[in-house]
Image: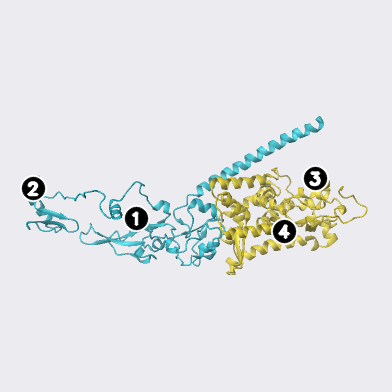
Chain colours: A yellow, B cyan
Amino acid sequence: MNAILKTSPPRPGAEAVAAKGWLAAHKWLILRRCSQLGILLLFLVGPWFSLWIVKGNLNFSYTLNFLPLADPYVILQSLAARQVPEKMALTGAAIVLLLYLLVGGRAYCSWVCPVNLLTDFAYWLRVRLGLKGSAHISRPTRYWVLGMTLVAAAVSGSIAWEMINPVSMLHRGLLFSIGLAWAVLLAVFLFDLFVMRHGWCGHLCPVGAFYSLIGKFSLTRIKLPARAACNDCMDCFAVCPEPQVIRPALKAIAGTPPVILEANCTNCGRCIDVCSKDVFAFGTRFNTTVAPVTGLAQAAPK
Amino acid sequence: MDNETKPSAAARRQFLADTARMACGVGLLGLGVGLYAQHAKALPPAAIRPPGALPEAGFSAACIRCGMCVRDCPFDILHLAKPEEPMSTGTPYFVARQLPCEMCEDIPCVKACPTGALDHSLKDINKSKMGLAVLVDHETCLNFLGLRCDICYRVCPVIDKAITLDPQSNARTGKHTLFIPTVHSDHCTGCGKCEKACPTEVASIKVLPLYMAKGQLSSHYRLGWVEKEKAGGSLVAPEVEHKYNMPEGMQYEHGKGLSGSSGAVPPAPTPAAPVALPKALQGSKL
């Protein structure tokens, strides 16, 4: 794959920019940044301007004194530590669970989580600086970390992971006071930049692993209605934070339908942006018929 | 068949090695997290949890570090612990010496808590037990020194119940009274107003977590006078009357002091008494 990357254009997406124009080739990226920063801003206008649209943080928030939202993962840890939360937190967790079952589990990672801004920046810089090589930890490590956090909660009888969780540390730090949390986040940034490509979000983060599990069953998916039009430019692989999810659906490995059903897909939509052939589109996990493309490779066997 | 099993054996070995590596790495991380969490369970004494907080073991399992209590505190006294502070990151606390709890009647912080880490069954703020005030330094407390500072007593929201001023004679001057601020744990809420208001350079009265501040009698201890009251009479029958082993011709009665039956001995405790006593002793033939 490295060999292919070297022969591809220096900036992935250049073809798409040429074919569709800059804006269309960055549409989902821009929307995603708006979502990430917008959500952060909704939280921040409270402490900054005493405009309390949303109170709390990503672990639990209360919007307009009406809508409770709770992180089901932190509630799960609380349950593992043998504490049953009050109805408010349970309701909030159920709403969030349903939401991500609709929009895609790891949509949390790419559309909401503030750490994604940091790790995306690290990856962008990594490419810009031409840093090659990456430590190897297998991607499923995150599920082990997820399991470990639940065991740690059960054994210690406390939500132990919250002590060092960089995700909530960053969000809480921005809203309340950051303290030395910046050091933890700098460590995550440097780890992603110098040690490991997509290291934190793609290999270690148990929050992402938890939302991946939701993503196994979620509705919104990246579909490949025109996968036969793929010209193997590899741009989607270059920009995807979880490139292993693309291949089965794109190349119809073992009869995979033209929809990315892999749990780790973050629904970031960057592949849609950078594809000059418009192979990808947002859709649902159902109704996976392929648009007929004449004169190109056949679709998966029935 | 062999051609197919060979690579799968290698793959299995690789899989086992990878799994072992992951398990070890993650296990080490888990050990670190667990130990760190264990350390953080010992709350630093200056950090007081908001009203209604579950005991620390339950609290660190129930609190999801959302900061809703911090937001709904109208006096902004609560903080969320930063990672470098020696307690569970993101959990709420206040420092009484900086800003004490104002004991709002509607307890908004408890209402805001979505998980019940702040117990929703707490409806009366006067029943809260955030900590317990302890007059930690008898050497610097101005009332102990004989002054009428009384500030802790005056600022106490549960005045005359949580802190009373108990008179004691001032042995230094021999003629004044010390008004000793005395905390009563059944009424003290641990709000910290006394600690905040204490005028000494470093507070002489401090709010401490209950586990540090409160002693406990052994379960087999019985207080005779309490048992007597409960039973409505003496548990020892017949009740032995206490006898004071006094010199001949002298009497002592609890609450009244010394008296001489013949009138020869001046009533105690007058300054002359110590002089008169040896005279009386001469006749006692002890």
Label 1 element class? loop
Q: Which residue is located at x 68 percent, y 59 percent?
A: A99
Q: Count the numbered circles shown.
A: 4
- Residue at mark 1: chain: B
Q: Which residue is mark 4?
A: A103
**Quadrant where the N terminus of chain B is found in the figure:** top right
Left or right, A250 with reference to B227: right
Question: Badges 3 and 1: C-beta atoms under 8 Å apart?
Answer: no
Q: Chain letter of disc 3?
A: A
CA separation in Å, label 2 and label 3: 113 Å
Q: Which residue is mark 2?
A: B284
Using the numbered discs, state the Cα–Cα distance from disc 4 to disc 1 in whole angstroms: 61 Å
Disc 1 target residue: B137
**Marks 3, 1 in one chain:** no
For label 4, count other residues whose C-alpha is less than 10 Å away and answer few (under 14), some (14-19) or many (20+).
some
Q: Position of residue B123 (x, y in %)?
A: 47, 63
Residues at marks 1 and 2 touching, judged by CB atoms closer than 8 Å = no
Between marks 2 and 3 in the image, the one whose residue lies nearer the viewer? 2
Residue that appears at 78% across and 31% down: B6
Q: Quadrant of the C terminus of chain B?
A: top left
Task: Rate crowding at label 2 as few (under 14), some (14 to 19) or many (20 or more) other CA atoms within 10 Å.
Answer: few
Circle 1 residues within 10 Å: few <14, some 14–19, many ≥20: some
Of the image marks 1 and 2, the number of the one nearer the N terminus: 1
Task: Please tell me if label 4 and label 2 are on a single chain.
Answer: no
